[in-house]
Amino acid sequence: DVVTRMSAGSDEVLNALRNELTERDVDVFIVGSGDPHASEYPCGAFARRAFISGFTGSAGTALITQTDALLWTDGRYFLQAELELSPSWTLMKIGFSAPAPNSNNSSPISTPTIEKWILNTFENASKSVHVAVDGWTTTSSEAFKYRTAFQSSVNIKLVPLNPVLSNPIDTIWAMNRPALPSNPIRIHSLELSGKSARDKLNELAIEIHKKRNENLKQFSKLNSMLVCALDEVAWTLNIRGSDPPHCPTVLSYLLLTVDTETEEDIENEKWHARLFIDVNKVNDEVKGYLNEMRVEIDPYESVFGCVQEISQGGNQLWFDPVSTVMALADAAGDCSREGCSSSALCGDCEYLNPCKVSTPIGLFKAVKNESELNAMKEAHVKDAMAMCNFLCWLENALYSNDQSCVLNEWSIGIKLDGFRAEQDGFLDTSFPTIAAAGKNGAIIHYRAKEDSCRAVTTDETLLIDSGGQYYEGTTDITRTLHYGNPSDFEKECFTRVLKGNIAMECAIFPVGTTGIVLDSIARQYLWQKGLDYRHGTGHGVGASLNVHEGPQSISSRSGINPVPLLEGMVVSNEPGYYEDGKFGIRIENVICVVGAECEYNFGDKDYLTFENITLVPIQKELLKLDLLSESEIQWIDTYHDKIWNVLEPRLMKDHRTETVDWLRKATLPLN
């Protein structure tokens, strides 16, 4: 069949989809990046947006009509999208303003949101306009956003795809669509997790009881919590898998139901938990473990019916609308649609509305305990050894005359992955390795392709952003390098980025401070010269879980969800600068939030700071020393001394004498 041979993002695919939409009476089709769990890196079977548009970035939403094909994405992916989208697609730059085309008006026009674009385009249509989404990949919060926007429109209606029929993109994809993964799951040991799954479930059962008692009028029938985010299921039950790429999680749902109304009975484990999963992934050892944790095993696809039973039985369900898809939210009795009462009891369907707020799991997971932190530090030592082995090899390869050694973005990325794989306990990369030479470094989330990658030479910058998944933890590190003669401007940008990185790590701030307050600390030295970067400064990092973890972040956009940084949280510290068409610079370490020792204690507040757990040298050849203060020079020397003291004995134990020699030079004091 010709449709099975279509290329991703081709006009042939787009035309075939439009034919499918016509047959299903769909005028507008919104295609997000997600899966039934709102995962950042969905399994290949759910990469529908990438297939239809050709854009492979991890964040973006496509919209298709009979005449338009548009893709919305943020500043991290503007250059990548421009390269990957065909001329049939229009890139919609989120947060970007530009002069209106063919207009003398100098006032910039902001990129409209998806719902605003639909309203502007179809508000005066002569017939009803059906806007379709897939209820199994569109989250409850996204559905609420669309329903609210279209509520006042006479013509525009949001219509979930018929759940009985396949997604129209799957019909086109046909036999070429990847199968769902069937990888087995494993137990994440108590030594690494620091708390048993049974204790975590008990704590969550108590939280259900508290939530109900906080507002008996609205949640008097609340007795269950549905967990859909894969990392939250894995963290709660202390299990790991390898279903989504780069994430040690497994396709599954967790349902926790409290069987009593008294907290005393909950503490005596008057609750039951159900794991919805492909039962073929669960071996006898894991079955025994889950039974010991009082967790039942149910087929993955049965979660819909179980959720329906809760709402139809007169009970209420607690779920996070950001990670729960529309299909399950509606099954739970969610009637946040046109004409629905805002009270707990919905007058339209006579079900009790669910509790649609974040569950406490995200925050519990983000604040690492001592066992998790110790394990993460060990993972970063292993990762640093791999990085240093790689950087030693790369420097030697660049300066050698070995013509048989092919150095390009693709080949060095494969080589780095190989050095990580040598480390004991290595599982996978934590995201696709970014090796970006010269102008490609300005593409913030660039990914090299074997047939079109750039050569790596001594003539231009090289940005390497990479990470590993280990049994002990998750890593994420970026280093920017130049093995020739960098320009003064490149050195100045690099030094100002490093100054921001140092300032962030050394910041001291009171308990309760959010990431939006801290973000400008990392940007200040770039701002002094009118420079900046189009991404956040820091994201949470999981404990052998997702490399990008919430709810905390360090970003100018953190005000959307102002979660304060708490002791035990782990975040990245990654300021950068990107000169379009020329080079990119980013320096990224992973830092832990720790208590700060202060001389005074105004307002009886505790203060916090950061501890750097990344152990890879900063390349000194890119520094402009006259821009560094004495304290910054001391920071660099102290950091490099720490790296030497930690890694040298471990590398010697592995008989990596060549790397030790390289490390000695890389960590010598600046002066």
Image (spheres, rainbow, N blue to C red):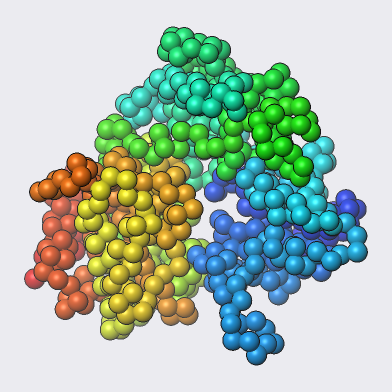
**Percent coordinates x, y for residue 246 in the rendering:** 49, 46
201 up-or-down from 418: above or below: above
Q: Report x, y in % for residue 417.
A: 41, 53
- Left or right: residue 51 versus residue 228 is right
Percent from the top left, x then y, of residue 278? 63, 28
Classify residue 227 by image quadrant.
top right
338 up-or-down from 556: above or below = above
State the image quarter where residue 123 is shown. bottom right
Of residue 254 and residue 376, the one placed in the foreground of this image is: 254
Report if residue 46 is visible in the image: no
Q: Residue at the spot x=27%, y=59% of the render?
A: 504
* 362 sits to left or right of 660: right
* Nearer to the camera, 569 or 589: 569
Who's the residue at 41% across and 46% down the image?
563
Q: Residue at x 48, y 12 (%)?
A: 262
Q: Residue at x 84, y 66 (%)?
A: 124
Quarter that holds the C terminus: bottom left
Q: Is residue 65 visible?
A: yes
182 horizontally vs 477: left or right: right
Q: Position of residue 385 (x, y in %)?
A: 27, 50
In depth, the one of 340 and 71 nearer the eye is: 340
